[in-house]
Image (cartoon, rainbow, N blue to C red):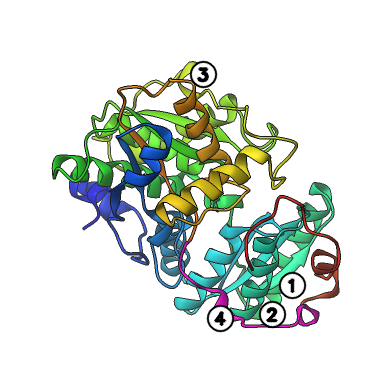
């Protein structure tokens, strides 16, 4: 039984859920990394090993979202992301494990090694990939694909929003806070004062903000924005929190609804750089530092920028005396073998541009 259902049994009856991952994920002290920063209480929450064959933060959301697709007897799911989307890849992998097809609706993103790998992996696990140059184009494309798949398969695909951040998906991260609470109670880590997490589609941050309060933890969240303000802002985060709390309250009146004001939803902006998926020098330094000290492998779009915020705060003395937790949201399971040295020409032609142009100079990730 997952910690949220333990605490709120009526949610267990009301919510769709299919176990996909290995939970609880470990929480570990970062000794060597801490020494490099002159800080002795930095911990990491290892959502990078949240599932097999693929970890990362999307597994928590997919347990609920794909649970719903199964309950509703869908045959396929259709979801959205940028071209290198970890969410679309995770969805494709776990949908296939459940016997569901998947369709990924993708928008342009600066090229990188991890983007190339994710496209090849998505193709290898059977995802149907579509690329659109703009938001209006993706809206039209979605209507078309929904109709086409309804005709082909006799049933419309289940739509899953970008990043899996609907109230149902966010519930996975409400549960994550209760999981952390259990680990603190069991003495596996001290109660964190601060928790750093990346903010893309905002579901992880929204779920943690709700869950930390509901679980009675004093931990303050430091959400680090890595995406344009049109996608993530305090106003949008507050709205997602309100929708999720109402969703849970409707299904179990015992679930506490706390008031969140905009001041509770402020996002850290200084590590964003020039754009989503555009790497920064601080980003590259953070990735190298935790790789060398802890052998933890991050990437430049989300986790590198988030860890750069933690490092920056530590260096200016803002973390003195505090217990700090870094939530690792990036998959670390070795998946590349699944595609070996596949030629990108097997992908639809619109994706070839990501393999033919130059990579960003700060892209240090080995393929
Ligand atoms: C999707 C993703 C995030 C962002 O999580 P959201 O819940 O969408 O805000 C962070 N890190 C990685 C590696 C991701 O793939």
Residue at 68 percent across and 62 percent down: it is 115
Q: Which residue is mark 1?
A: 148
Q: How crowded is the residue under tag 4: few (<14 C-alpha within 10 Å), some, or many (20+)?
A: few
Spatial CA span between label 2 and label 4: 28 Å
Q: Is residue 170 above or below residue 268?
A: below
Mark 3 or mark 2, earlier in chain: 2
Residue marked by disc 2: 152
Q: Look at the image and give the residue range highlighted in magenta.
A: 332-346
Q: Nearer the viewer, mark 3 or mark 1?
A: 3
Mark 3 or mark 4, earlier in chain: 3
Q: 262 above or below 223?
A: above
Q: CA distance from mark 3 to mark 1?
A: 42 Å
* Image quarter of the N terminus: bottom left
Of discs 3 and 4, which sits in the foreground? 4
Marks 1 and 2, how far apart in space? 6 Å
Q: Earlier in the sequence, mark 2 or mark 4?
A: 2
Residue 31, numbered circle: none
What's the distance in space between the residues labelled 3 and 4, CA to CA? 44 Å
**Residue 278: x and y, percent?**
72, 45
Q: Earlier in the sequence, mark 3 or mark 1?
A: 1
Q: Which residue is mark 3?
A: 262
Q: Residue at x 68, y 31 (%)?
A: 229
């Amino acid at each position: 039984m997952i910690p949220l259902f333990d605490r709120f049994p009526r949610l267990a009856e009301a919510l769709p859920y299919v176990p996909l991952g290995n939970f609880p994920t470990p929480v570990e002290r970062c000794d060597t990394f801490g020494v490099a920063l002159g800080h002795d209480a930095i911990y990491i929450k290892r959502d990078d090993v949240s599932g097999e064959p693929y970890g990362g933060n999307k597994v928590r959301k997919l347990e609920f979202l794909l649970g719903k697709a199964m309950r509703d007897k869908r045959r396929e799911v259709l979801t959205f992301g940028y071209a290198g989307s970890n969410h679309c890849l995770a969805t494709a992998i776990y949908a296939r494990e459940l016997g569901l097809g998947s369709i990924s609706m993708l928008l342009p993103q600066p090229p990188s090694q991890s983007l190339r790998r994710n496209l090849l992996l998505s193709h290898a696990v059977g995802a149907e990939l579509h690329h659109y140059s703009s938001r209006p184009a993706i809206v039209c494309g979605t209507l078309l694909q929904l109709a086409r798949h309804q005709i082909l398969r006799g049933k419309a695909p289940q739509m899953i929003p970008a990043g899996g951040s609907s109230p149902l998906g966010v519930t996975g991260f409400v549960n994550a806070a209760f999981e952390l609470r259990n680990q603190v109670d069991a003495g596996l880590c001290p109660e964190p004062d601060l928790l750093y997490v990346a903010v893309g589609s905002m579901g992880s941050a929204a779920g943690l903000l709700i869950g930390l309060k509901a679980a009675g933890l004093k931990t303050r969240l430091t959400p680090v924005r890595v995406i344009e303000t049109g996608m993530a802002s305090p106003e949008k985060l507050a709205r997602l929190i309100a929708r999720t709390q109402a969703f849970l309250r409707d299904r179990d009146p015992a679930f506490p609804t706390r008031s969140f004001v905009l001041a509770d939803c402020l996002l850290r902006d200084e590590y964003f750089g020039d754009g989503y998926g555009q790497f920064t020098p601080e980003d590259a330094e953070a990735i190298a530092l935790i790789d060398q000290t802890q052998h933890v492998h991050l990437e430049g779009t989300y986790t590198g920028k988030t860890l750069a915020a933690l490092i920056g705060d530590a260096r200016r003395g803002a973390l003195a005396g505090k217990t700090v937790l870094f939530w690792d949201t990036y998959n670390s399971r070795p998946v590349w073998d699944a595609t070996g040295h596949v030629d990108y020409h097997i992908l639809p032609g619109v994706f070839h541009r990501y393999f033919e142009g130059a990579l960003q100079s700060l892209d240090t990730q080995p393929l």
